[in-house]
Amino acid sequence: MRIVQRLTRHLVLTLGALAMLSSAEAGKAAIERTEQPKAPKGASEQPAAAGDFDEAAIKKAAGEIDAIIDAGLAKDKIKPTAKTRDDQFLRRIYLDLAGRIPTIGEAGPFLASSKKDKRELLVKQLLASEGYVSNTFTWWADMLRARSRLQDRFEGQPYIDWIKTSVRENKPYDKMVYDLITAQGDGTKRGNGATGYYAADAGMPQDNMANTVRLFLGTRLSCAQCHNHPFDKWTRKDFFQMTAFTEGTDTHSNEGEIERAVKGLKGDAPYSTGNIARRVGETLGMSVSNGDKGEIGLPDNYQYDDAHPRDRIRARTMFNEDILSAGAVSVRDAYGKWMTSPNNARFTLVAANRLWKRLMRIGFIEPLDNLEDDTKPFNQELADYLVQMLKDVRYDTRKFQEVICRTSAYQRQSIAGDADRFKFHHEGQPLRRLTAEQMWDSLVTLTVPDVDSIKDDSAETLYRFYDANHGKSTQEVAQMVLKAGEAQDQIDDYEKQMREIRLGLEKGGDKGQAEAKIKDLQNKQNALRPTADIFTPYYAKGGNSVGPMRRASELPSPMPPGHFLRVFGQSNRQLIDNSTDSLNLTQALELMNGMVETTIFGDDKSALSLELAKGRNLDDKVLILYASILSRRPAGFEIEYGHKVMALAPNHRGVQYLGWALVNSAEFAFNE
Amino acid sequence: MSNPANRLDEPTRRAVLTGLAKAAFGLSILPLAGSLAWSDTPAPAAVAQVPPRKKPASRCIYLYMGGGMSHIDTLDPKPGTRSQGPLKAVNSKADGIQLGELLTMTAAQMKHCTVLRGLSSNQGAHEQAAYFMRTSYAPINTTRHPSMSAWSNFFQAKPGETLPGGIMINGGGEHPGSGYLESKFAPLPVGDPARGVTNIHPPQGVDLKEMRNRLDVLESLNHKFYKSYDLKAMKGHGDMYADAVKLMAAKDIEAFDISKEPGNVAARYGDHAFGKACLLARRLVEKNVRFIDISHGGWDTHDDNFNRLKGTAGQLDQGMSALIEDLAQRGLLADTLICLVSEFGRSPQINVTNGRDHYPKAFSAMLAGGGLKGGSVYGATNAEGTEVAEGKLEIPDLNATIAYGLGLPIGKTIMSPDGRPFTIAHKGKPVVDLFTA
């Protein structure tokens, strides 16, 4: 027993020291950040101020939330779990706010620090980090179904970039929603990516409205698209009155116009111009028009007595309010203002519930998007408090979450069993699996250093293309398309020639001569590629320069089926909040036999390999593995066991053995 | 003394004793029914009481057309009416049955097929309708219902199976999976049929002996954490690894490798994801995998319906016809039920952008093989395809028919974990007459 204690004391010293020793710069930076939270790198403006909701107000609010929860616990005689240990808190707060595990350089200083307010400082630091932007992007992308391609037609990168920028600038929640549902104009114009909200449902305005109401008002109207809601009060007329607010909204492309112009330039235009015209039209010409009539015709099959088929009806809110009469600037503006008004009770209720659930894992109303008139939160007082608080912080979501992270309720250890999500007292955090993104991003953290700084820049390429070309006439654009099309056709023709040469070779022929010809054709192809790719002059950083090991937020959205992220349940982003945490054995195969072995342990330049190289002895290596992978110190018996495991294979392979097991462990897979 | 350190002793010597390592030696860990209550008590009166099929099909290939397959352009053509549009109808090998011209190769296999032209659904939005089609229940927010694949695993897994009972190819997040059943009953996803099950071999340089040692270490490390939490998800985590190891050691694993097929065979199925999936399905059926679920998207043709269908329906035609032909030729078709379904049909009315919109009111599906009488049509729509005229089948009826064909107990009541009674096909009534016996 004494040996274990001595070992542990030794380790307390080692870990802090080692973390700083092994990555002195990162450690130092982490401490500096801890002392003085800074605005995130690349933020174009300071986070918007949440009124006068200062440090004292945050502290007070956290205490009041705890008082409400504790009263509920006392009333039902439920004993809360203990406060998290520092290492438990550390891992949880990193996963919840930054969306990934901490590096050893981030973990060490925090665990070693004896500052009384180190948790509060860490919360502030993480909320201001790029890791938070990445993680919060995922949250929004799942809600908004933000895909790299919208309706398989339009570029989604500007939309994705708009979400990230809005999160980075800490745009208030209500403002963000207002911007989304009032978006119009050119979608590829820098800063106008919110138009993706309509492009994502191009051609399906009714589905778009049903989604809007479900997302922001927590209410299912989609049934009423075809008939009166069978269980709730909504009528088909209510639905069409709501849809009238966005009636006429459409997403356009001018590919047809460009194609016609190309044909005008050259009757038998190259085959490839069709594709190129589409790409250009859907980028340069992508535009969301705003109906703004505030009227809609009822469908032919309208079946109720309260109106007739094909009647034109005026827009009214689903609660049957007329918001257009009183001197509205525009239909869309009135609709946006109504939706995001603090007086629209369901709007703030749903937002507060979503944010609460994001951190506390179970909402005060479950499920969060099927509200009916008689829906009651399990803890009414808590719901009322949080709704008021969201208004008080003026919809500043970081501030709101900061309060939650500071509560004792958030900082409790996990409960041992399954939580009852319809009457949960928050006696401790329900255990949850790492999401697909958290799992992937954590593994990427073990692979590449400074993971949050790696950014996707594909939106920038589109913006540059737009800036340079949107002023041009259709004729000029058609010239570009024609030139690129000719080059592409030539490339395809060379490809055909190469195939023929290869076929000829199979039948017997001079190998050397054939290879020389192929080489020559390839060179010719390469020379043409910049001309064929119409985006060539506009690539940021020379194209897709970052590798595949980057955070999920910086990869295509969603990844194709079969990618690690999809295997672990990433949303297909076709449906709202469509990610899944169901287990299947391909996940185990992925972790046992996939990238973990090759990318993390097999590469001596991986972030973890670089750390391990600094370990002086086996004790160090066990420590580095536990601190890097599980964000905690190993217990005494774990060190002893680690030695035994490492002895199963020589040198680095022994280390790999233990590391492999830790990445595959249940402790890694769950967020306590 | 329950010091966890004691558990962590001597990893190598204990290796052969652990469950995971046992699995690697070839002993299977089975998804047998057990933890969930199901009763033999008769289902409520509304649920069809039909004696079980005497010789049910033992395998199912479920072809799911995502987005809403235009029935008029595929299974229920309406030549000479406004609804038809520019595509033609073609005669099939069965007298008097026509299909859309995009299904010409399928038409040649018609003697194995039964077209159902009287489907009707009340769900017109993709998500809800797809869920309804796969589960027989409208989506509710308080539980998730199991897919037919999960039911097959739940009721029909047999000792000795080493390949998973259910495989899902090209599927996405919309699949209900195991619903409220344990996650081990969910189908195994194969993202890319050309790659099969990825990561099925131990990492390079790691042999099976080292893998066993590693698994043993892993189990020791997990011991304490598993003991701290009494959760469904935690049990699932252990099962997931056990199943993965079982599959790694399965001798039939090469069934997943379609590159083993001769080039001319692969070419008949087509060089596209759907064709490859059908080819993989055939290989898996040969190894007695019970339920193979294939998704094929691209059917949501609100605009430019007729041009867009050429690709989508053309691929369906090529893959499905090759599959039917090969299974028949191998003598496997009589025992394999092929289902072609979609969440809804598309409007007989052609819209201003030459598209067709969602149409759940009257649409079609097709069954093939599985001991069907074949060469027949059940149900019909009216002249323009706007209404079901006869042989109306609600979605639960279709699912009851499929379940009946597969010998699943449609009359049984199953209690979900939150104590609610469900049946496999809700209140659906099977069309028993479609089958020979």
Image (cartoon, grey):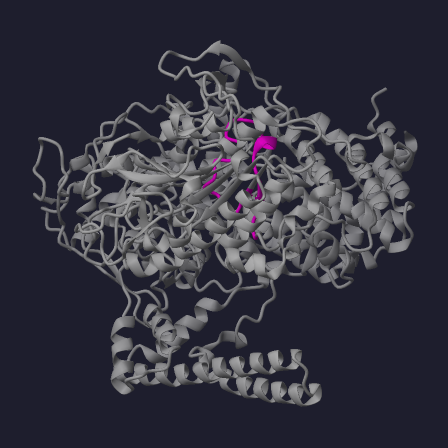
Boundaries of the magenta span: B168-192
Quadrant containing the C terminus of chain A in the rendered view:
top right
B326 or A326: nearer the viewer: B326
Farthest residue to the top: give it.
B41
Toward which corner of the image does residue B426 lie, by quadrant?
A: top left
Q: Which residue is located at x 54 percent, y 38 percent?
A: A406
Q: Is residue B120 magenta?
A: no
Query: Looking at the image, can residue A94 be seen?
Result: no
A455 shown above or below A553: below
Question: Whole-percent x and y of residue A33?
Answer: 61, 55
Residue B423 appears at what percent x and percent y? 45, 20
Residue shown at 42% from the left, 22% from the top: A378
Q: Nearer the viewer, residue B283 or A391?
A: B283
Report the front residue among B20 and B171: B171
Question: Is B180 contained in the magenta span?
Answer: yes
Q: Would you say B228 lies left or right of B100 here?
A: right
Q: Please name the residue shown 45% across and 47% down the image.
A: A142
**Magenta-highlighted stretch: main secondary structure?**
loop
Q: What count of labels does the image hold?
A: 0
Image spot of residue A326 (x, y percent): 10, 46
Asked where in the image residue B304 lies, by quadrant, the reply is bottom left
Residue lying furthest front = B95
Q: Say which of A63 and B5 sits in front.
A: B5
Residue A199, given in percent of the width and then of the height, sits at 32, 57
A589 horizontally vs B37: left or right: right
